[in-house]
Image: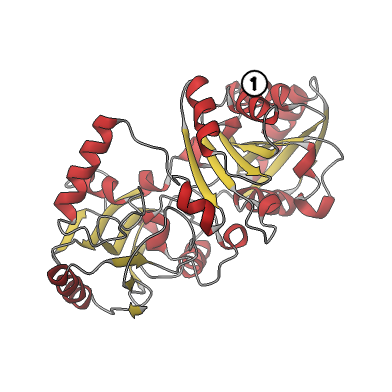
Amino acid sequence: MTEFHPRTDEEAASIIRDHTARGGALAIVGGNTRSGFGNAVASEAVLSSSELTGIVAYNPGEMVMTARAGTPAAEIEAALAEAGQMMAFEPMDHRPLMATEGEPTIGGIFAANVSGPRRFVSGAARDSLLGVRFVNGRGEIVKAGGRVMKNVTGLDLVKLMAGSHGTLGLLTEVTFRVPPKPKTEETIVVSGLNDAEAANAMAAAMALPLEVSGAAHLPLTVAWSFLDGKLPQGEATVLRIEGLPGSVSVRGEKLTAAMARLGSVKRLAEDDSRRLWREIRDVKPYADGTTRPVWRVSVAPSIGHQLVAALRLEEGVDAYYDWQGGLVWMRMEAEPEGDMLRRYIHALGGGHATLMRATPAHRATTAAFQPQPEAVALLSARVKEKFDPAGIFNPGKMG
């Protein structure tokens, strides 16, 4: 398969115009660390942003960064760490789960709208994105958005590119918010709660004026795999507090006192806390080197445990919960069982199920993304036609 690695927007535009003229499909990739995710793409060539690298503009005082899309995420994070700032949406590293190599890129993060444990309080990746530069299916270089939040020119276009998975164009540059990084953190671990009890405990913690920035529940089947088994034995409901050291200490004491009424409580100091949430973010229990199907399910926090309980009656399933129970990471023992899973989701009030990992055979027969309602699907098709009239970008990726 032919691979293209343009170094400039103009070079990328020329490649795209050539393929549009010939009707040749292009697989759009960044670092290719999510290879195997989404519906299979039929293409004759790969167009990568991996050579479009470098931080274009960064003034920590403005709390905004502009970078070329192929810039490695590690380079972005290093620059932010030096200035005491961060990507608030806490993007996961898909390599352990997907068993892929390469380097995650900042453009890939926004193209897939990758968001981690802090998403339920800080927003998704798209909520931090202020501006984009990309090449559409006509080979036109388009710029939308700006470097400050009050500049909303083209804001809808910016949001459309976030989470489009390379189906609307090749991202070449992104501008995004970078707020201050908390000075420290700690995690409160409540032991021994079942899934339903944990859902109630997390809801109670979020209702307190303590600014909890992480809320996850790790059932017995997965809790042992975190921190090399250093968590207390049994189920673990984990709650993160971040901020200035004095504030974290006081809020931690208050949260500990509130949760002690529900079960045994332990407090994790900064280093163990940071490591735990990285492992939760990167789906450590299911980064097992297998191709057993893994789903990422987004539902209302109150029904996540109900969904898992219903599935366990019919299918071998393992799961844990993030986002106060609203994000369910779920591993099936054998078949993806996508139809059954989505049936239960619909019956419980709705949500989204995305197939993250599966064998090629299962990917060929299971829709990776939640099917859209007819009106939304028609609108999406219209948007796709405007951005990519010849349909050359990642054909079939999103269904």
Residue under label 1: 204
How packed is label 1: few (under 14 Cα within 10 Å), some, or many (20 or more)?
few
**Residue 266 is drawn in which quadrant?**
top right
| Image-based side of 66 in relation to 101, left or right | left
Q: Amino acid at mark 1?
A: Ala
Against 333, residue 83 (above or below) is below
Against 363, residue 381 (above or below) is above
Circle 1 sits in a helix, a strand or a loop, which is it? helix
Q: x%, y% of residue 170? A: 27, 64
Return the residue nearer the eye: 156 or 260: 156
Q: Residue at left 21%, top 49%?
A: 384
Q: x%, y% of residue 69? A: 34, 66
Q: Residue at left 67%, top 62%?
A: 289
Q: Name the image colouring.
A: secondary structure
**Residue 191 is drawn in which quadrant?**
top right
Q: x%, y% of residue 177? A: 37, 51
Look at the image and tell me whether residue 68 can be seen.
no
Q: Residue at left 82%, top 25%?
A: 263
| Image-based side of 398 in relation to 320, left or right | left
Against 313, residue 333 (above or below) is below
Q: Residue at left 31%, top 72%?
A: 44
| Image-based side of 260 in relation to 330, left or right | right
Q: x%, y% of residue 368? A: 45, 47
Look at the image and tell me whether residue 335 can be seen.
yes
